Each structure stands twice: as structure tokens, then as C-alpha cells.
Amino acid sequence: MYYVANGFEFCDIEESISKRKTYSGKKEKKKIIFYCDDFLGSNMYDAISNKRDSHIVKFIDRIKNDKVKKFILTSRTNILTKAISLSHQFQNHKIRDDEFLLRIEKSI
């Protein structure tokens, strides 16, 4: 991974972002890359109804304002599109502004 090779500590966020105490948003000089695989989880509706969308947006905002922190979220495109259509938090904070699409195609 590019960032780890360049001195960033890798932090895999396995649990809910709302419960994560790893990063408070205070300016620390420690370089960290946060990674959250399938951040909407297996049940996107549960994530939105339990207000995890607001926790995710707050976490993204803290990372965006810190020059030595990075954040990678993964999700399937169809799930993210549906979540954005249901979540005012995701719509208002334009979380797709920094989206990258990775296409994996079967080669013949």
C-alpha cells in the first residue's frame, strides 16, 4: 500500500465508526490511514436508521481537515447509490466528491 510505504500507520476500522476512539479529530502529527471495508455493512437500511450515516460524515469531515490523516471507505456502487438517496447526511456532505471507482472485470 502506497501510504504505508510512505510512513502512514494502517488502521483497519472493523467496528462501527461511531464507537471508534482511535481518532478524536485533534491535530496529531502521527500519519494514519484509516480503512473501513464495506462501511455500510451488510444492511444499509440499518446503518441509516441507526444514524451511523451522521457518524460516518463526522469522521470524514475530521479526516478531511487533517493533512496527515487519510481515509478509505469501500462499498459496492449500488449500495452507496441507494444509501445516498436515503440519507440527507450523505447528500448534504457530498461524500461522492472524492469517490474513486474500481472496476474489476473478468479477463478472457
Image (cartoon, grey):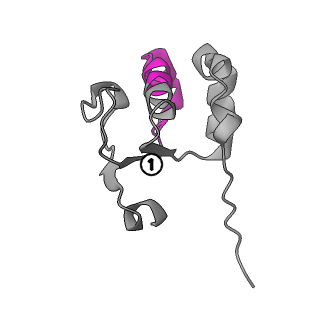
Residue 42 on the magenta segment: yes
Work out whether residue 29 or residue 2 is closer to the camera in this orientation and state it. 29
> Up-down: is 29 above or below 57?
below
Residue farthest left in this picture: 21
Residue 26 x, y percent position in the rendering: 31, 26
Residue 100 x, y percent position in the rendering: 66, 50
Horizontal relation, residue 85 to residue 14: left or right: right
Residue at the location (29% across, 45% down)?
A: 30
Work out whether residue 2 or residue 40 is closer to the camera in this orientation and state it. 2
Magenta range = 39-58
Work out whether residue 14 or residue 34 is closer to the camera in this orientation and state it. 34
Residue 83 on the magenta segment: no
Residue at the location (30% across, 33% down)?
A: 23
Q: Which quarter of the rendered picture does the C terminus lie within?
A: bottom right
Residue farthest front in this picture: 29
Q: Main secondary structure of the magenta part?
A: helix
Q: Which residue corresponds to mark 1?
A: 37
Please indicate, yes or no, whether residue 46 appears anywhere in the rendered image.
no
Residue farthest bottom in this picture: 108
Residue at the location (45% across, 66% down)?
A: 1
Residue at the location (70% across, 75% down)?
A: 106
Residue 102 x, y percent position in the rendering: 66, 58
Q: Amino acid at mark 1?
A: Asp
Horizontal relation, residue 12 to residue 67: left or right: left
Quadrant of residue 19 within the rendered picture: top left
